[in-house]
Amino acid sequence: MAGWGGFFFSLFNYKTEKYVIAENRKIGILFRIYQLAVLGYIIG
């Protein structure tokens, strides 16, 4: 029965995402260029 208890407790677990805010302009520009490159690769 110990296995069932662990199963029921795992139903109440949840995950949250972590966000990182980088206030560096160079990193932001590189990130946007990377996003555009990936988008261009997918579309084109």
Image: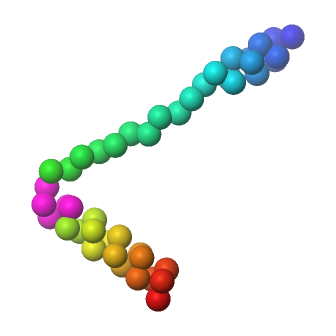
Residue 33, quarter of picture: bottom left
Q: Residue at x 77, y 13 (%)?
A: 5
Residue 12, quarter of picture: top right
Q: Residue at x 38, y 39 (%)?
A: 18
> What main secondary structure does the magenta stretch of the protein show?
helix
* Magenta-drawn segment: 24-28
Residue 23 position within the rendered picture, expressed as x and y whole percent measured from the top left: 15, 50
Indicate left or right for 43 with 34 as reference. right
Q: Residue at x 47, y 89 (%)?
A: 44
Q: Residue furthest front?
A: 43
Indicate left or right for 15 with 25 as reference. right
Q: Nearer the viewer, residue 13 or 1?
A: 13
The answer to whether 32 is drawn above or below residue 20 in the figure is below
Indicate left or right for 12 with 37 as reference. right
Q: Residue furthest right?
A: 1
The answer to whether 23 is drawn above or below residue 43 in the figure is above
Task: Give the total of numbered labels.
Answer: 0
Residue 35 position within the rendered picture, expressed as x and y whole percent measured from the top left: 35, 70
Q: Is residue 23 magenta?
A: no
Q: Is residue 27 magenta?
A: yes
Quadrant in which the N terminus appears: top right
What is the basis of the colouring in this image?
rainbow
